[in-house]
Image (spheres, grey):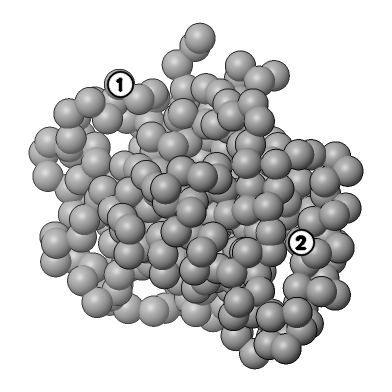
Amino acid sequence: MRPINIGITMGDPAGVGPEIIAKILARRGVAKLGKILVIGDKWVFEKTASPKSKAGDCEFIDLRNVPHKNFSFGKVKKDFGQAAMGYLRKSVELIKSKRIDCLVTAPISKEAINLAGYRYNGHTEFLASAFTKEKQDLVMMLLNKYLKISLVTRHLALNRISSALGGEVIYKTILTTDKALRKYFAITQPKICVAALNPHAGESGLLGREEIKLVIPAIKRARRLIKNIIGPMPADSAFFAASRSHFNAVIAMYHDQALIPLKILDFKSGVNLTLGLDFVRTSPLHGTGFDIAGRNIACPDSLIAAIKTAVECTKNLRRFK
């Protein structure tokens, strides 16, 4: 099997992205994972990099997107949002030209990219647009050493979740998750649990009717194509059982329903994996860290986990094909 070419975008240049990339490049063994290609602004990167960061098999694509004047870490600016989107657009070119095999994205600021005129809630929505996918065809999976969780809804205000749920999107999330477990993780007979939206799975409608109207019909429909689906199960029970390896993945109805158990169990190994693309894209499970950016205290462990996951999934995807 030929070596894997790993593209890493620098994220928001004023965030911790440059620093955590520099730190992983300084670690022994990282270069053995594959050929690393960093996409960003080299002069910003070098503000955080030690001499060891240049070790290993790494190429840097310097887009020179960030104005030198008045640059400082930890600031939300239109220029920085524009720069971050430039790194992503370049990464799309590299994927389409097959120069890189997988993509790892350092965190971007949703506020900064919106100031720059982009209307995306995150990487997932941008990638859907760039690869002409419907938004509902892509699924955000969050994982660590203990759990794999797919989200039905993503970055959405809590008071909009119920109205955003639908039988079709729940059904597609189940099928996409099943396919990804087979392709990316080489699990031949995945076991999937669907978490309920309401406490106690709605108590037969007493605590909410979403389970009766939406979740149960979607599960029944999915069972026509795949086996081993359980639910809807109260979320607390679902995550406990999954953490004990009773399921390969849980389907969560909203963002924090998934993030809270995931981060409590193990934040450092947390990874965001996009399902539904024709290639593997991952990112660390944290944000831009503007409050600590430029102070050389950011932890790179989640980024390393994202790179290792991207490599593992890409290898499995090659075998699957």
Helix, strand or loop under label 1: helix
Front-most of 13 and 215? Answer: 215
Q: Going 51% across and 45% down the picture, which residue do you hit?
A: 246
Q: Going 77% across and 67% down the picture, which residue do you hit?
A: 215
Q: Name the residue type under label 1.
A: Lys
Determine whether, in the image, residue 61 is placed left or right of residue 183: left
Q: Going 76% across and 46% down the picture, which residue do you hit?
A: 175
Give x and y (percent) for residue 163.
77, 83
Determine whether, in the image, residue 320 is placed left or right of residue 21: right
Q: Is residue 305 visible?
A: yes
Q: Name the residue type under label 2.
A: Ile
First-in-chain label (1 vs 2)? 1
Quote the CA–CA distance across marks 1 and 2.
Answer: 39 Å
Q: Furthest residue to the left?
A: 51
Q: Are marks 1 and 2 in contact (CB under 8 Å)?
A: no
Looking at the rendered image, the disc whose residue lies closer to the viewer, 1 or 2, is 2
Determine which residue is flagged by label 2: 170
Determine which residue is flagged by label 1: 32
The quadrant in which the C terminus is found is: top right
Q: Going 50% across and 73% down the picture, which residue do you hit?
A: 256
Label 1 crowd (10 A; few <14 / some 14-19 / many >=20) = few
Q: Is residue 64 visible?
A: no
Residue 275: image tag: none
Classify residue 94 by image quadrant: top right
Determine whether, in the image, residue 57 is placed left or right of residue 252: left
Give x and y (percent) for residue 46.
21, 50
Classify residue 181 by image quadrant: top right
Front-most of 178 and 6? Answer: 178
Front-most of 298 and 160? Answer: 160
Give x and y (percent) for residue 121.
60, 71
Q: Furthest residue to the top?
A: 1
